[in-house]
Image (cartoon, rainbow, N blue to C red):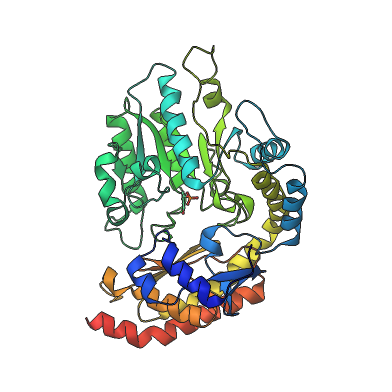
Amino acid sequence: MTKNYSHEDLIAWDRAYLWHPFTHMKQYLDAEPLIIARGEGVRLQDTRGRWYYDGTSSIWLNVHGHCVPELNRALVEQLERVAHSTLLGMSNVPATLLAERLARLAPQGLTRVFYVDNGAGAVEAAIKIAAQFWANQGARTKHLVLGFHNNYHGDTLGAVGVSPDEMFHWPFTSLLPPHPRVPYPYPYRSTASDPLAESLGAVEETLRRRRDEIAAVIVEPVEGAGGIIVPPRGFLRGLRQLCHEYDALLIVDEVATGFGRTGPMFACHSEEVAPDLLCLGKGLSGGYLPIGATLATERIFEAFLGEVDSGRTFFHGHSYAGNPLGAAVSLANLELLEALLPRLPEKISRLSAWLRPLADEPFVGEVRHAGFMIGIELVKDRATKEGFAYRDQAGWKVALAASDRGLLVRPIGNVLIFMPPLGSTLEELREMTHILSEAFRATRDSLASLAKG
Ligand SMILES: Cc1ncc(COP(=O)(O)O)c(C=O)c1O
């Protein structure tokens, strides 16, 4: 990289040439951009020299922190062997080793690993595998995927098709297939006396009525981008049973929840559920490189075996699938993660205790968390649970106050999302939650004036 630039050059070039993902560019261009230059442990340093805790895990990816010697070493060693070779009709060493490791760590029966290079790609592959699984057996009408309102599965069209969001995806509605959707259990806002029963009841009713059309049910074990909504225990198990009963495959999207994010290696483990298809991404490489995977059972895999002209082959893939660098760093990440997992329960229970006082903040409706996935829902009025208007950007006010104090967090709508790296020490977690509390205290007055309208 050329060294011939200044902080001011970077600001000018960022403003002139970049179009940032999921970013209101008009507002972005009005403020000074935050440009990260390096990372160390669970902190990032910007081009002005200021350090910040990475309270988003760089958008839910980072596991052990930045610049981890073991991960760096794995990457460099692989780089000296080969950076990339294709997986189309042949294999490479790290992708093969990683497939064996994933099959061993995943819920039972998920023994086939189909590589992709991001989370949405893992979902796309799962949807297509589900539809073709039934088509290969002559059940061509079974091609729809039952999803849940507000679940998020990524931004490619297939993934959007099973999780369209009014605000994010309204321009694409006409491009999407008519996949059915039902409510996700959302205890804080549900009007049902039993949100779990309501949701499972809607799944059952839809599967019963449309058994011949529905190939699969797709679900997030914890609704991430929808606002860290933690369903009551028994949800995944209930879905597993219904899918068995009504001949639908169960696709669990663990792109966000996988790799220790909720405590166990996979959220499925906490209900001892084994899906038919499992979507993985984000934390797989520890937050180093874009790699994802769709894991399938042998039953599914076998439905794709046939003569070359049988039409059974899964003609799908990406040029960088099973990239050796991504696979090598993922293997090193999993090695460290297996050693880290036993230490997570203590970190999670301390984190939970440190977050508790935030629930008393005047504009906090609920603090939710599943392991290292934390959502703090802001409301104008705790009694009515009325949220702030989107244009108020209430969550951003708190996030900016946190960033001024050295913690990066990012809201989605009225939910402030806090996702520290799993490798954060207890002291670092304590410090991050302290900054969060300070940020809430500092924004009380401005939230109060927004609340008054
Ligand atoms: C549950 C879930 N699925 C899929 C995705 C998409 O992953 P990616 O951004 O790597 O395409 C995300 C991203 O946030 C996610 O949270």
Horizontally, residue 373 falls left or right of residue 102, namely left
Residue 439 visible here: yes
Question: Total marks drawn?
Answer: 0
Return the x and y of residue 73 as percentages of the image width and height. 76, 55
Horizontally, residue 41 falls left or right of residue 26, namely right
Nearer-the-camera pick, 8 or 389: 8
Residue 34 visible here: no
Q: Quadrant of the N terminus?
A: bottom right
Nearer-the-camera pick, 367 or 418: 418
Nearer-the-camera pick, 342 or 36: 36
In the displayed structure, 355 sits above or below 343; it is: below
In the displayed structure, 388 sits above or below 142; it is: below
Q: Residue at x 53, y 81 (%)?
A: 435
Q: Residue at x 27, y 37 (%)?
A: 178
| Quarter of the rendering containing residue 96 | top right
Horizontally, residue 159 falls left or right of residue 379, namely right
Return the x and y of residue 18 as percentages of the image width and height. 44, 62
In the displayed structure, 280 sits above or below 40; it is: above
Residue lying farthest to the front in this orientation? 4
Residue lying farthest to the left in this orientation? 453
Horizontally, residue 183 falls left or right of residue 326, namely left
In the displayed structure, 200 sits above or below 289; it is: above
Q: Residue at x 50, y 25 (%)?
A: 314
Q: Quadrant of the C terminus?
A: bottom left
Return the x and y of residue 89 as percentages of the image width and height. 62, 25
Nearer-the-camera pick, 387 or 166: 166
Return the x and y of residue 259 as percentages of the image width and height. 60, 52
| Quarter of the rendering containing residue 229 | bottom left
